[in-house]
Image: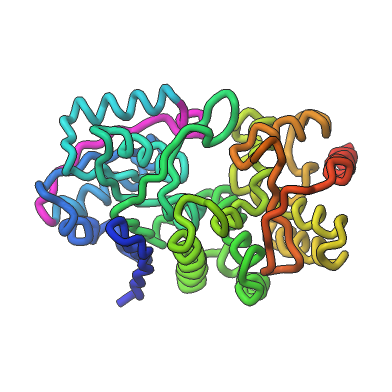
């Protein structure tokens, strides 16, 4: 019998469990049954995920007599848009989803964010269940209730806090991920160690390669520890008034780079997070906040995992340093016109900073861009 863990996210009337283990798709009906007022759910997914996992989910639901309709959207970040949102909501209304029904988001971060936002605004809010199929979604985007879409102004600028009613993180689904996608998700795993758990980062330094090769026990622990950390932070700061901002380590750089690459396959979100974390530690060292060798240790681990680490790892052209800073200024974490970065005093010791000297930031970017040539 494989291990199944439940991590509770204690948010009063909005509390829920994140269930982590193997073979959860087959148990989906039994796990969702307590949420349902009628034996019917609507599933939002995307075409690649549907081909791999929709039959398994629907079989797990059918085993408990739960019927399901499914709508598969196009894969990719471009789906997380006004058009994708409109198509999702109209389909849910076509399916006559009622206020007490449950929407299931089966997919990675794009589908989880989009499906959750559609559920948040449908009939002024219906419940939804996250069934994350990527490592990134299992450890990060499926937990915490952040939902939303991108616009031409930037990433995740339109959305709502809408907590799921249940998250099913099936470790077996990670087997179907291409190596690049798995490693992109690992960027978010590393982030948890860097922002608040030095012992976890050390564990990853030792176990990361075997985890990437497919060790289920190691994958289970990495997902559980990541979810435990995020659940604790979300419980203390649900709407990001303080501590939850630490989860954005690397993201100010990441979101600017995603915008610069057109939210395309040139740069996956988790790759941008990994590069952003490396740059955040470089910036921290340059400002005298952490030891000079700390950024090298971060980069060494990312390199050992075969991950994107620097701007040089992004194919194609990038804008200059001033243009990247301008893209950062569109980030939703900007307050009173001041850029907010998550910086570090060391591995596992991060904090929010909104007084980064502009010349130091620019020098970091100029140097990183120069290294591409």
Residue farthest to the front, as pictured: 336
Residue 192, percent from left and from top? 59, 63
At 35% from the left edge and 75% from the top edge, which residue is drawn? 3
Residue 342, percent from left and from top? 68, 54
In this image, 175 relative to 166: left or right?
Answer: right
At 71% from the left edge and 59% from the top edge, which residue is drawn? 302
* In the foreground, 180 or 370: 370
| Count of all numbered marks drawn on residues in the image | 0
Check if residue 74 falls in the magenta segment.
yes
At 24% from the left edge and 57% from the top edge, which residue is drawn? 28
Q: Give residue 153's quadrant in the image.
A: top right
Looking at the rendering, in which quadrant would you find the N terminus?
A: bottom left
In this image, 223 relative to 9: left or right?
Answer: right
At 77% from the left edge and 48% from the top edge, which residue is drawn? 355
* In the foreground, 169 or 82: 82
| Relative to 33, residue 318 above or below | above
Looking at the rendering, in which quadrant would you find the C terminus?
A: top right
Residue 360, percent from left and from top? 87, 46
| Relative to 45, residue 238 above or below | below
On the question of residue 202 being in view, the answer is: yes
| Relative to 302, residue 218 above or below | below
Q: How is the image coloured?
A: rainbow
Residue 346, percent from left and from top? 75, 68
In this image, 54 relative to 271: left or right?
Answer: left
On the question of residue 113 being in view, the answer is: no
* In the foreground, 367 or 349: 349
- Magenta highlight range: 64-81
In this image, 147 relative to 29: left or right?
Answer: right
Check if residue 41 falls in the magenta segment.
no
């Amino acid at each position: 019998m494989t291990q199944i863990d439940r991590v509770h996210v204690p948010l009063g009337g909005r509390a829920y469990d994140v269930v982590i283990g193997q073979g959860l798709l087959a148990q989906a009906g039994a796990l969702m049954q307590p949420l349902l007022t009628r034996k019917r759910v609507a599933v939002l997914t995307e075409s690649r995920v549907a081909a791999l996992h929709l039959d398994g989910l629907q079989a797990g639901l059918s085993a408990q007599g739960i019927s399901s309709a499914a709508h598969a959207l196009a894969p990719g970040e471009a789906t997380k848009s006004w058009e994708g949102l409109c198509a999702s909501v109209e389909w849910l209304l076509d399916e006559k989803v009622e206020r007490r029904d449950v929407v299931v988001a089966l997919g990675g971060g794009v589908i989880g964010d989009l499906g959750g936002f559609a559920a948040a605004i449908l009939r002024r809010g219906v419940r939804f269940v996250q069934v994350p199929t990527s490592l990134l979604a299992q450890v990060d985007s499926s937990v915490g209730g952040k939902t939303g879409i991108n616009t031409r102004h930037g990433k995740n600028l339109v959305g709502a806090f809408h907590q799921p009613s249940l998250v099913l993180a099936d470790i077996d689904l990670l087997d179907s991920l291409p190596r690049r996608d798995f490693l992109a998700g690992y960027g978010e795993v590393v982030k948890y160690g860097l922002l608040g758990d030095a012992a976890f980062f050390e564990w990853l330094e030792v176990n990361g390669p075997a985890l990437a090769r497919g060790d289920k026990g190691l994958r289970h622990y990495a997902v559980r520890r990541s979810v435990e950390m995020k659940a604790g932070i979300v419980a203390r700061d649900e709407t990001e008034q303080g501590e939850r901002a630490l989860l954005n380590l690397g993201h100010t750089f990441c979101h600017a780079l995603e915008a610069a690459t057109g939210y395309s396959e040139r740069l996956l979100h988790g790759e941008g997070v990994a590069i952003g974390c490396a740059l955040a530690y470089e910036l921290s060292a340059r400002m005298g906040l952490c030891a000079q060798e700390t950024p090298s240790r971060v980069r060494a681990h990312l390199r050992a995992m075969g991950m994107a680490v620097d701007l040089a790892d992004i194919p194609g052209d990038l804008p200059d340093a001033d243009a990247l800073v301008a893209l950062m200024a569109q980030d939703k974490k900007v307050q009173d016109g001041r850029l907010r970065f998550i910086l570090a005093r060391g591995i596992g010791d991060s904090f929010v900073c909104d007084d980064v000297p502009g010349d130091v930031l620019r020098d970091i970017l100029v140097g990183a861009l120069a290294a591409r040539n």
